[in-house]
Image: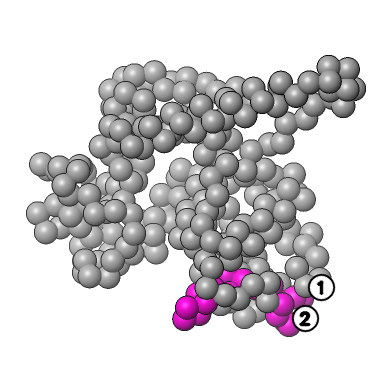
């Protein structure tokens, strides 16, 4: 059940299942993953990285290598090779099984994403939201599926609220901003700027125009900075804001069937 709190920016009441404040659009620092956000399906390698980072997944321990052609035994991974996307599994003997190779990034990402969820579910971890259980006897007695429809409607309503917050009144978008020739990155309630060849935590840029200065969340090498998501500052942010990392503390990659093709 969702809890409630107050937005630190405007003081409005915010539920824990709202990713952003419904009044001012600021990021909700108390947002939890077991909400409509959990049904988010990543379609690109970068989105899959973000999905895992939001949930504090220790990918190295889990043996998932996203965006990397990892060659050692016992590994799942995805990477881009020219115009193709490659999804692979390295078995315990070091041999490689290719799950998919082709130009469809969304399909490739989905293949690895489903395997990631399968490995999590096998260990009792549900980054996509815990499954709901209903009594079979109760269902047969009622002969109705109204509860399922109600649950779906609720999910759709929450998704619509989140979508509306993203489309209307979001003046604290996550991503890169260019302010007076300087490049900043905004995430959660934190700001970072780039100087001395690295990213550093800073205060909100002075005189920022959230609409005019926003340049998106996709990195461009033409800005003269490094990718924030590859920085130690981003890793530190993930460590401090990961609400579910404890779920993975006991992860043992030995629980994976490394001898099968997939």
Residue furthest out toward the front: 143
| Above or below 247: residue 220 | below
Q: Residues within 10 Å of mark 2 (few under 14, many from 20)?
A: few
Residue 172 image offset from top left, x and y in percent: 28, 39
Relative to 150, 223 lies left or right: left
- Residue 93 shown in magenta: yes
Q: Which residue is mark 2?
A: 93
Predominant SS along the magenta part = strand
Helix, strand or loop under label 2: loop
Q: Is residue 5 above or below residue 130?
A: above
Vertical comparison of 10 with 93: above or below? above
Read off the magenta span. Answer: 78-97
At a point 64% along the width and 62% down the height, the residue shown is 111
Residue 229, position as x, y percentages in the image: 39, 59
What is the number of the mark on residue 49? none
Image position of 146 (left or right of 27): right
Q: Earlier in the sequence, mark 1 or mark 2?
A: 2
Q: Which residue is rendered at x = 33% and y = 46% of the image?
A: 174
Q: Which quadrant is the C terminus positioned in?
A: bottom right
- Does the CB distance between marks 1 and 2 fall below 8 Å? yes
Residue under label 1: 259
Question: What percent of the width, then of the height, locates residue 51?
Answer: 52, 51
Mark 1 crowdedness (10 Å alpha carbons): few <14, some 14-19, many ≥20? some
Q: Which secondary structure, mark 1?
A: loop
Identify the coloring.
one colour
* Residue 68 at least partly seen: no
Q: Nearer the viewer, mark 1 or mark 2?
A: 1
| Residue 158 magenta-highlighted | no
Going 39% across and 64% down the picture, which residue do you hit? 230
- Which residue is nearer to you in this view: 41 or 24? 41
- From this viewpoint, is residue 211 visible? yes
């Amino acid at each position: 059940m969702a809890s409630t709190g107050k937005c630190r920016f405007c003081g409005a009441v915010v539920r824990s299942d709202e990713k952003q404040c419904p009044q001012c659009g600021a990021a909700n620092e108390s947002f939890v993953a077991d909400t409509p956000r959990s049904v988010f399906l990543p379609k690109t390698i970068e989105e899959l990285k973000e999905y895992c980072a939001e949930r504090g997944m220790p990918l190295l321990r889990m043996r998932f290598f996203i965006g990397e052609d990892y060659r050692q035994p016992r590994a799942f991974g995805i990477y881009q090779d020219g115009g193709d996307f490659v999804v692979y599994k390295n078995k315990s003997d070091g041999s490689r099984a290719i799950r998919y190779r082709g130009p469809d990034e969304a399909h490739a990402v989905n293949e690895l994403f489903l395997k990631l969820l399968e490995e999590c579910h096998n260990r009792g971890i549900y980054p996509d939201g815990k499954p709901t259980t209903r009594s079979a006897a109760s269902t047969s007695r009622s002969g109705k599926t109204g509860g399922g429809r109600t649950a779906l409607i609720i999910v759709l309503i929450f998704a619509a609220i989140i979508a509306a917050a993203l489309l209307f009144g979001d003046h604290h978008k996550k991503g890169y901003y260019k302010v007076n020739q300087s490049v900043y990155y905004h995430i959660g309630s934190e700001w970072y700027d780039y100087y001395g060849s690295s990213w550093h935590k800073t205060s909100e840029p002075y005189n920022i125009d959230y609409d005019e200065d926003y340049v998106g969340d996709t990195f461009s090498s033409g800005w003269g900075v490094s990718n924030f998501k590859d920085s130690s500052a981003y890793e530190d942010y993930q460590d401090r804001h990961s609400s579910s990392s404890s779920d993975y503390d006991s992860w043992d990659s030995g629980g994976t069937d490394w001898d099968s093709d997939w």
